[in-house]
Amino acid sequence: MLSLDGAALQGTLGNEAQSSELTNVMLDGNKISFTAARQTRRGSFEFTYTGEIGDDGDTMTGTFEVGQGGGFTIPWTATRTDDN
């Protein structure tokens, strides 16, 4: 979930099991990037997300990279919900 608090964009990334605060949240025009850390059974991992906000303003698409420099990249999609 992303929200705007004054001039600061902030948010959380989560599922049923856990939630992580987003860090390094940057918005430049329709481009967005942020980082989230997750603790797993295999240790702690940092995920770096980059993407673009759709023309409708209600969707975002992009990729996220797991690990630093040379992890792997996975596509992601986000959609605005009524509770935002």
Image: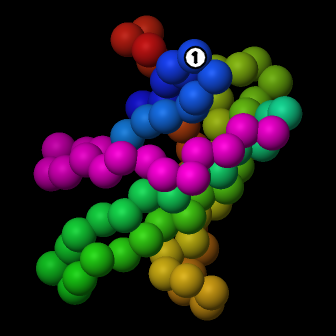
**22 left or right of 21 in image:** right
- Quadrant where the image shows the C terminus: top left
Total label count? 1
Q: Determine whether 81 is above or below 1 in the image.
A: above
Circle 1 sits on which residue?
6
Q: Residue at x 49, y 81 (%)?
A: 67
> Is residue 26 within the magenta segment?
yes
**34 left or right of 81 in image:** right
**67 left or right of 45 in image:** right
Task: Tell me the crowding category of disc 1: few under 14, some 14 to 19, or many 20 or more residues within 10 angstroms, Cα based.
Answer: few
Q: Determine whether 33 is above or below 73 in the image.
A: above
Which element type, helix, strand or loop, lies under badge 1?
loop
- Quadrant where the image shows the N terminus: top left
Q: Residue at x 55, y 83 (%)?
A: 68
Amino acid on which disc 1 is placed: Gly
Q: Residue at x 51, y 20 (%)?
A: 5
